[in-house]
Structures are given as C-alpha cells and as structure tokens.
Amino acid sequence: DAGITQSPRHKVTETGTPVTLRCHQTENHRYMYWYRQDPGHGLRLIHYSYGVKDTDKGEVSDGYSVSRSKTEDFLLTLESATSSQTSVYFCAISESFGTSGSGNEQFFGPGTRLTVL
Amino acid sequence: GIQVEQSPPDLILQEGANSTLRCNFSDSVNNLQWFHQNPWGQLINLFYIPSGTKQNGRLSATTVATERYSLLYISSSQTTDSGVYFCAVEGNTPLVFGKGTRLSVIA
C-alpha cells in the first residue's frame, strides 16, 4: 500500500472557524491532490501540487487554499468553514501527470470526514 | 472539460453471478483508472488501464481508447465485491471521476 496518511480522520467544527487538513506521504511522489466526495457527485478535484510551493486550482477550489512546504506534506485549509464544505476529503499522490505511463497512477489516502455545523 | 459517464448507476447481483460495468468518456486520455470504494469508504486501486486489457483474478478490464470507453468485468461475484466502483480519467487535468456504479452482491 502507498504510504499516505491523512489527519485528522474525523472532525466536527462550527461555521466560520478555520480548519486545516493534512496529507502526509512517504513515497517521495512529486504530485499531490485534494479531492472532496459528496453524494451524487463522485470525487471532485479541489487543488493539486506539482512540487514544493507549486500548486494549481481544480474544479471546486472556491473557499479552499493549499500549501506545500515539503515534498511529503500537502495541507488543505478552509479559511472560514461553511456547511456546504461538509464532505469527505481525500488526498492522493502520483509520480507524474500528463504523460503516458503507469507513473500517472494515483493512490489515495484513507480520507477525512469533516462536518461543519 | 472531459466528461465521464458510468452505467448502470446501481446493480444488484446474486452471489456467483457475473457483471459488466461501463465507463464512457468524452475526450482522449493519458490515464484511466478503476477503483473500488468499499463500505468503509476506502478507495482501492483496481486497474490502471488507459488502453488494452488487463486481468487480476476474477476482475478484468478493457479500454478501447479510440472509441472512448472502458469496461470492468466481475466474474463469480462475492459479497465482498459490494461497494461503489468508480472510473476516473486524466486528460489535460488530473483525474475526473464518474459518479460510480453501486454494486450490491446478495448471498
């Protein structure tokens, strides 16, 4: 199994509070991703990173920011949580992106269940 | 952006039956993956298959890239196969997921 951990695994917070989720990998992969999963939508990309300090937006980036100061860690921050951000958040990693070859294969962490009251 | 459609949305099988899940996508892709999300929410990689055919035990997958579809075959289904099966594709953006097929295998 790919070495990906997420913390916390569960969190309940109140509307308007800041929240930071952490993804940690031990595979030294260049690419890291944050997705959210909601009923009826499958998984949708929030942000991704293609190296230390290099990030880009995904389909549903509004209300989220990310940071990557080390290869192994990718943080997702909700500056002021809203009830619409109640979801399950998954982190993923891959060696490469945009090229052919199995290095593009993404591996997923266990997920963080976030509830915003 | 690229669109991914999976069918059927729901499937109920008797243990031992076979099934075929389909994934259609709207553009050329560098990556196509099949995942199984188990009842505990874990996403398990089944196949990395942007083209061709692969087999792993009772599961096999075929992607016909020129016709923009992929098929996942499950043979001799078991109750542990229950869960949601996702197809996801990567074109110019990271993985775009379909909405999944929910499979229930009944003993």
Image: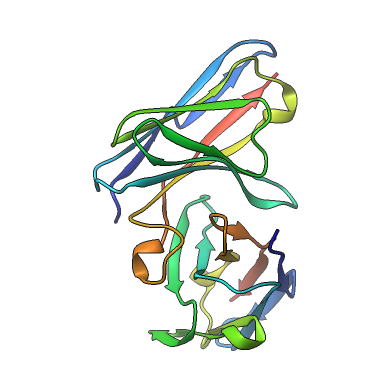
The quarter in which the C terminus of chain A is drawn is top right
Taking depth in this image into account, of A10 and A74 the one nearest to the observer is A74
Taking depth in this image into account, of B59 and B68 the one nearest to the observer is B68
Residue at the image position 70 percent from the left and 14 percent from the top: A15
Taking depth in this image into account, of B9 and A29 the one nearest to the observer is A29
Q: Position of residue A5 (x, y in %)?
A: 35, 39
Left or right for A72, reference B69:
left
Q: How many marks?
A: 0
**As drawn, A62 above or below A4:** above
Query: Quadrant location of residue B12?
Result: bottom right
Residue at the image position 56 percent from the left and 71 percent from the top: B29
**As drawn, A44 above or below A16:** below
Taking depth in this image into account, of B74 and B68 the one nearest to the observer is B68
Residue at the image position 42 percent from the left and 86 percent from the top: B54
Residue at the image position 57 percent from the left and 60 percent from the top: B92
From where the camera sits, is residue B83 visible?
no
Query: Quadrant location of residue A110?
Result: top left
Q: Position of residue A28 (x, y in %)?
A: 24, 45
**As drawn, A1 above or below A56:** below
The quarter in which the N terminus of chain A is drawn is bottom left
From where the camera sits, is residue A68 visible?
yes
**As drawn, A92 above or below B1:** above
Q: Position of residue B6 (x, y in %)?
A: 70, 71
Q: Position of residue B3 (x, y in %)?
A: 72, 64
